[in-house]
Image: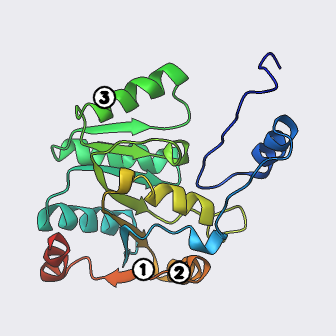
Amino acid sequence: RSLPKSCQVLLFSATFKEPVRAFAERIIPDPIVIKLREEELTLSNIRQYFMVCQNSDEQYKALCNLYGSFTIGQVMIFCQTRRLADWLSGKMSRDGHQVATLTAELTVVQRASVIQRFREGKEKVLIATNVCARGIDVQQVTTVVNFGLPRNQDGEPDFETYLHRIGRAGRFGHRGIAFSMVENETVELVHKIEEHFQTTIKQLDPYDMDELEKLAA
C-alpha cells in the first residue's frame, strides 16, 4: 500500500496456486502474463526414472544400490509423511550418511538453519516432506528421490508437487536426475504423470547394477 503507483512488480514461479493468483490480480492492475501450458512445464534438463519397490525396506535397498552405482553429490529425498522421513533419516544416519531432516514441525528459524547447513555442504542428504518442495535453490543438488509419489487427497497424482520436487535437481540450467520409487499398485500414477506432462519416465530395475551404473555416463 505504501509503494508508489509507478513501481514495477514482477512475480515468477513454476506454478501459481489460485489464492496467490487472486492476490496478485488485486495488487497488480492489468498485468502482462507470460505462461506455459501446464503440460509444457516438465523440466527437459532432468532425467526421470521410476523403480518398483513393494515396501519401505525395498525402497531403502534400491536407494543403497543407487549410491553403490554412481557418484551422488547432494541429494534431496522427499517423503509423504514425517514418520517415513524420520525412519529414513535414522536408517541413513546409521549407515554413515550425513543427513538433515526438514519437516513441518520445525520453526521457521530451525528450517532456515537446516537449509543453510545443507547449502554449505555440512550435510549431503536432505530428507524432507513437501514443506521443502518449493523455493529451495541449492546448486549442488543433482539428484532428487521420491520415496513414493506425491498424491492428493483423492489418491491421484499431485502433478504440481511432483514438478516442484524434481525441480530441486538441475537448478540454474544444470542437468539433474530424479528417481521415483513406487509400488505395483501405484505404477499407474507414473503413467498419469507422463501423460499429464507429455514426458517419459523410464523404468529401472533397482537390482540391475549394470543398468544403474550406466546412469553415470
In the picture as drawn, the residue positioned furthest to the top comes out as 2
Q: Are marks 3 and 2 in contact (CB under 8 Å)?
A: no
Q: Position of residue 86 (x, y in %)?
A: 40, 43
Residue at mark 3: 117
Rendered residue at 31%/28% (across/down): 117
Rendered residue at 77%/27% (across/down): 6
Rendered residue at 31%/57% (across/down): 174
Does residue 14 sit above or below 9 in this rendering? below
Does residue 1 sit above or below 58 in this rendering? above
Q: Secondary structure at mark 2?
A: helix
Rendered residue at 42%/61% (across/down): 146
Q: Amino acid at mark 2?
A: Glu
- Per the model, the C-alpha gap separating discs 2 and 1 is 7 Å
- First in sequence, mark 2 or 1: give its number: 2
Residue at mark 1: 201
Q: Secondary structure at mark 3?
A: helix
Occupied quadrant, residue 145: bottom left
Checking the image for residue 212, the label placed there is none
Q: Position of residue 144 (x, y in %)?
A: 36, 58
